Every structure is written in C-alpha cells, then in structure tokens.
Amino acid sequence: MTSTLMHTADTDGARAGRRVLFDVDGTLIDALDNQRRVWRTWAERHGLDGDEVYRVALRTRPLETFAHVAPERDPHACLAALHELEDEDVRSGVYTAFAGAAGLLSALPPGSWGLVTSNYEHRVRGRFARTGLPVPEVLVDAAAVAQGKPSPVPYLLAAERFGVLPENCLVVEDAPSGVLSGLRAGMTVWGVNTPVAVDGTHRHFTSLEEAAPEILTFVTGAG
C-alpha cells in the first residue's frame, strides 16, 4: 500500500485548500494501554478505584475528571501529579504507530496535514520520535486553546493556521469528543480504529490503514 500512496501523492499533488487534521492518541499512535496505566497509577496513589477513574477520564478533560472523582483535592496538584506520570511514560513507555500511519503521513503532500490533540506538544513529539512518525508544521495542542475537545476551538484554530476554510478540512478521529469537536467546527469527520462508527462521523473505517487511500484521495483528488 505504501508504494501506491507515494506514487499517487507525487503524481497529483495537493488539491488546493484541502487539509487533513489528525487526532493523535488512538488515531495515529496506539496509546490506550499507556493512558490506562497512567490513570490507574494516579488513582492508586490517591486511594481511588483505577477502573472507575479511567472510565471518567475517557470522556472528560483532566480537571473535569478530578472534579468528579476527587472533588476534595487540589485540582492543580492532581494535574501536576498526572503530568509527571505522563512525562515519565513518554520516556519509558512502549508506543506503536497504528498500521498504515507511517506510509500515509509520508505520502501526504508537505503542508497538507496537521495534528490536533488534547495532549501537549512535547509529549506528541516524544511519542512521534519513538515511533518514527514525522511531525507537521501545524500542531494544535492543549496549551494552544482555552477550550479543548469537544469544543470546536482546537480544529478551528488548525484551519486558521493553515489559512483554509473549515469546510475544506477532513478530521480523522477515534473518540466521541474529537468527532463532536470536528463536527461543531463544520468539518468533514471520518472515524477510524473503532469496531463500530462513532455517532456523527461521515464515514467509518475499522482501521487507519483501511482509511489511508481515501484520506490521500481527499487531499490530492486522485482516483
């Protein structure tokens, strides 16, 4: 598949104005076990049930998670402890890129894609370095916005940085909050790496590898 993708991109170039915006964790990088382990470790240190904390964390931002599972604790101290665990996991954890990720990112024309993540840029760069994925020029992280997913703000900021209209952007996501963020931004949203479609997605693919040729076609107009 990789050789076909590369040939298509070289031949057709980017279609004017179209951009692909990828989520990171769960979309390009398989970090599910890492996230579960970090949250469970945090929960254990605070005398909480790790499974319950992780269930809450899956659908909320960290400060919202703390307010729900540990309302009596200082949220900023909780966040600092979580960040320490996450940074250590970037240094020592095992990460893999999803099948098809490296070939797709290498095949996409330069400047045609970016990252929109609820994580922080230094962790994204650390994980990409560990997995050999290239880092694009446009990277919107948690520090770049006051409102994260499911707000449309992160994806709208990415479109603004590219200088393109939201309707010319394709969002590739795996999580309900990210899907909703892309939809609220007025973008086309495709879901990947889930056995069933996340509500609201315009198209669903069970894997990133399955979606890769269609993502390239969106950008290049090939096919």
Image: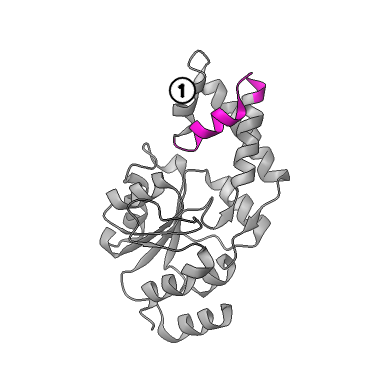
Residue 55 is a magenta residue: yes
Q: Position of residue 170 (x, y in %)?
A: 36, 62
Q: At 37% from the left edge and 54% from the top edge, which residue is drawn?
A: 158
Q: Which residues are magenta?
A: 44-59
- Quick check: 54 left or right of 147? right
Task: Decide which of 194, 78 is in the foreground and name it.
Answer: 194
Neighbor class of circle 1 (other Cα within 10 Å; few <14, some 14-19, many 20+) is some
Which secondary structure class fits the magenta region best?
helix
Residue at 34% x, 76% y: name it.
15
Q: Secondary structure at mark 1?
A: helix
Task: Tell me if residue 7 comes above or below residue 184 in the rendering.
Answer: below
Residue at mark 1: 68
Residue at (65% x, 34% y) in the render:
85
In the rendering, at what x and y percent does residue 71 appear? 48, 16
Numbered disc total: 1
Q: Measured along the vertical axis of the image, is residue 78 above or below residue 134?
A: above
Q: Is residue 116 visible?
A: yes
